[in-house]
Image: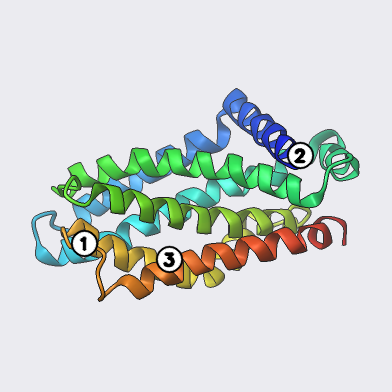
Amino acid sequence: MKFFRQVFVIAVKDLRAEFRTKEAINASFAFAVVILLLFSFAFDPDAETTREMAGGLLWIVFAFAGTLILNRSFARELPNDCLDALISAPISGAALFLGKALANFLLVLAVQLVSLPVFAVFNSLHLTEQFWPLLGVILLGGWAITVIGTIFSALTVNIRLREVMLPLLTFPILIPALLSAMLLTKALVLGQPVGVDNLSWLKMLIGFDIMYTAASLILVETVLVG
């Protein structure tokens, strides 16, 4: 019970800090909308090829927009040695990590939920037929981006070029999760249910989330303290 209370306190603290300045969330929203608008001009919305690429285009936006949020996760703690105070506080590294990951996930999810209808309007897509399975894939994929981005945000927080290093480190590891999310989203956007053909991709996405969440919780103390 104490562990989850600590997780909740860290998550609320991060959300309050972000909504006070709105630096990351505003940049992420603006980036997502601009890229979606450019995609709508670059590809014919009525073409079958565009519909087949819809899953890939959408997750490209999610991944890059999410990085803008995740990069600020630990960087906002650097002024006034707040990060050192958090590390030395009587809470476990796992609680600190999970609290920050939860706050980041909610911010990333907000960007995803705003981007999805914008993407549907720009590309003349009807998402209601498979909406709930699509929402499930978005949640699973969003958590994959969040958990990897949060642990690498902690790893790169003291690096001078952390804005460059974070995507360079996270995207190669995210390939299995992004590939699964892209292929599942492609099928769902086209109105196809999750069936035998793509069930293995759903299992891969779930397995990725479980495996990397567990690994991050185990390794976060080493990452933060060394």
Q: Residue at x 51, y 69 (%)?
A: 207
Q: For the residue labelled by badge 2, is the local secondary structure a helix, a strand or a loop?
A: loop
Task: Establish if 52 lies above or below 85.
Answer: below
- Residue bearing the label numbered 1: 193
**Residue 93 numbered mark, or none:** none
Residue 5 image point, x, y percent: 72, 34
- Residue situated furthest front in the rendering: 1
Report crowding for label 2: few under 14, some 14 to 19, many 20 or more residues within 10 A (C-alpha).
some
Q: Dot 3: what SS?
A: helix
Residue linked to disc 3: 178
Q: CA distance from mark 3 to mark 2?
A: 29 Å
Is the Cβ of the residue at disc 3 closer than 8 Å to that at disc 2?
Answer: no
- Which of 206/222 is in front? 206
Q: Looking at numbered disc 2 in the image, what kind of residue is underneath it?
A: Glu
Q: Position of residue 113 (x, y in %)?
A: 36, 40
At horizontal 30% and vertical 44% (from top left) the residue drawn is 116
The quarter holding residue 213 reads: bottom right
